[in-house]
Image (cartoon, rainbow, N blue to C red):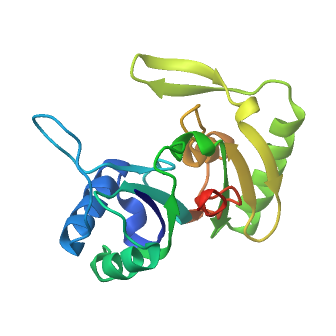
Amino acid sequence: MRIAFWISRSGPAALVSHLDMHRAMGRALRRSGLPIAYSQGFNPHIQLSFALAVPVGIAFDENWMDVTMSRDVFPEEAYQTLLPHMPPGVELIAAVALEQSGPTLMPLVTRAAYRIDGLSAQDNEALGTALQILLAAEEYTIIKKTKSGRKPVNIRPMVHGFTPGEAPEMLLSAGSEGGLNPLLLLTNLLPGLTSQITLTRLVDVRTPLGMAK
């Protein structure tokens, strides 16, 4: 069977890379004693995946961890068993059962909302102006570093919305189909950013709770 665990992270845990996050949760699952399933082959590994690979430096209120079990386990039992072994700064919020033959979680995430805390009034105003210009444009090209070098990328289709306020929010493309790193967007829109900001990915209404048995 498969169980989806809803987790959040904050503080220093936001500085952990996706690969290290994967390793940390793998260690927590092994310590918990849950009947986790492993892949076949010469180097077996835990059958574990995340709905979204959140970039370094970003906290999140929600991400989902898809774990395959070697036998049936009640979600509440799995939650209570894993809870004492969670890494510092990572909170376990819920667990739900998924259909064994159901879709993986990664393709379900196509957009992500991010809240920006800590902006000065000046930076907040500048960001609002810059995003209004971006959203009104048909094309907005930035230079992005890739494995093959630096290349121009039109990010306009990846920015879907902006909600102004003391802690403004941005809705951006995310997931396996290609996403936009909010830190990359901010550094391009506000090259002179001086505020010590905190970025948090917010709860997505399209969660595995809707896929539960």
Does 139 appear above or below 121?
above
Left or right: where does residue 39 sit relative to residue 123? left
Residue at 86% x, 30% y is 137
Residue at 51% x, 57% y is 98
Residue at 59% x, 37% y is 179
Near-viewer residue (131 or 32): 32
Q: Quadrant of residue 210?
A: bottom right
Locate residue 101, reporting x and y percent.
49, 43
Q: Quadrant of the C terminus?
A: bottom right
Locate residue 112, reporting x and y percent.
65, 51
Q: Quadrant of residue 34?
A: bottom left
Does 37 appear above or below 117?
above
Q: Quadrant of residue 90?
A: bottom left
Instruction: Give the residue furthest to the left.
Output: 42
Left or right: where does residue 135 sit relative to residue 85? right
Q: Quadrant of the N terminus?
A: bottom left
Locate residue 4, reporting x and y percent.
47, 61
The image shows a total of numbered marks equal to 0
Near-viewer residue (200 or 118): 200
Does 87 appear above or below 182?
below
Instruction: Give the residue furthest to the front.
Output: 72
Locate residue 61, reporting x and y percent.
57, 68
Residue at 37% x, 82% y is 80
Left or right: where does residue 211 sit relative to residue 74? right
* Viewer can see residue 59: no
* Viewer can see residue 157: yes
